């Protein structure tokens, strides 16, 4: 799915666009990839120089939700191959692993698990880029480069957030691979809210404000 044309890169909002970028990156989708992937105009720096972060985000998703998908061939094995060719990444992940106990407050049950550290930089940059691209895809306008985006990763989608976003617009890419909800302020379109659900198992919340501010809108 192609967004409207733009002379400017819709990710940074500053540089002339010379290519198209997938939002979110197509590498996170197992093959065969969905037919409704979204591309937007982008500059070379935003498209190509962030590829390492895309791979890190793919690995994070694979380790987080890989078991939830359709078998080894679809996600786990590609992620394992990526790590096999990058010993530094593999070492970082192994060092960050911790034994934890997961507790279910509903069933009062618990089970042991292994936790890994979120790659905050890769997550935040990829998710912000995705939101800026999806904004342009739906609005046909660039989310101003003066707009500050606050990004948070969520392990669960709590009841309060679910209720607050109940009447938001909904979009999908790859059926349930990415389901996202968004709300855009009619008085100031630079004020937006987004909830992105990746593979029904992990969530990212994003809020944009017209100008940079010292106040965290997600606090």
Image (cartoon, rainbow, N blue to C red):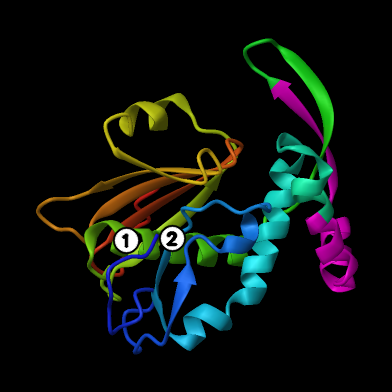
Counting from the top left corner in percent of width and height, residue 81 is at 86, 62
Q: Nearer the viewer, residue 52 or 213?
A: 52
**Residue annotated with mark 2:** 38
- 65 to 142, vertically: above or below: above
Determine whether the residue tagged by mark 2 lies in a helix, strand or loop: loop
Query: What are the residue bounds of the magenta stretch?
Result: 78-103
- 114 to 8, vertically: above or below: above
Name the magenta segment's main secondary structure: helix
Counting from the top left corner in percent of width and height, residue 53 is at 63, 70
**Residue annotated with mark 1:** 137
| Drawn side of residue 47 relative to residue 216, left or right | right
Counting from the top left corner in percent of width and height, residue 118 is at 68, 55
Q: Is residue 164 magenta?
A: no
The N terminus is located in which quarter?
A: bottom left
- 92 to 19, vertically: above or below: above
Q: CA distance from mark 2 to mark 1?
A: 8 Å
């Amino acid at each position: 799915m192609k967004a409207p044309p733009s002379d400017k890169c819709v990710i940074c909002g500053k540089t002339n666009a010379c290519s198209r970028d997938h939002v979110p990156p197509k590498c996170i989708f197992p093959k065969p990839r969905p037919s409704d992937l979204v591309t937007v105009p982008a500059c070379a720096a935003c498209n190509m120089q962030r590829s390492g972060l895309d791979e890190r985000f793919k690995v994070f998703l694979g380790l987080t939700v890989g078991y939830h998908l359709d078998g080894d061939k679809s996600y786990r094995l590609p992620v394992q191959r990526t790590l096999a060719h990058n010993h530094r990444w593999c070492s970082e992940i192994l060092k960050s692993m911790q034994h934890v106990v997961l507790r279910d407050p509903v069933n009062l049950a618990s089970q042991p698990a292994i936790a890994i550290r979120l790659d905050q930089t890769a997550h935040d940059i990829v998710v912000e880029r995705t939101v800026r691209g999806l904004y342009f895809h739906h609005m046909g306008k660039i989310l101003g480069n003066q707009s500050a985006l606050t990004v948070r990763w969520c392990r669960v989608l709590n009841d309060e957030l679910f209720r607050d976003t109940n009447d938001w617009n909904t979009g999908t890419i790859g059926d349930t691979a990415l389901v996202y909800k968004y709300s855009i302020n009619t008085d100031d379109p630079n004020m937006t809210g987004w909830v992105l659900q990746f593979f029904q198992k992990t969530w990212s919340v994003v809020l944009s404000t017209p100008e940079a501010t010292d106040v965290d809108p997600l606090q």
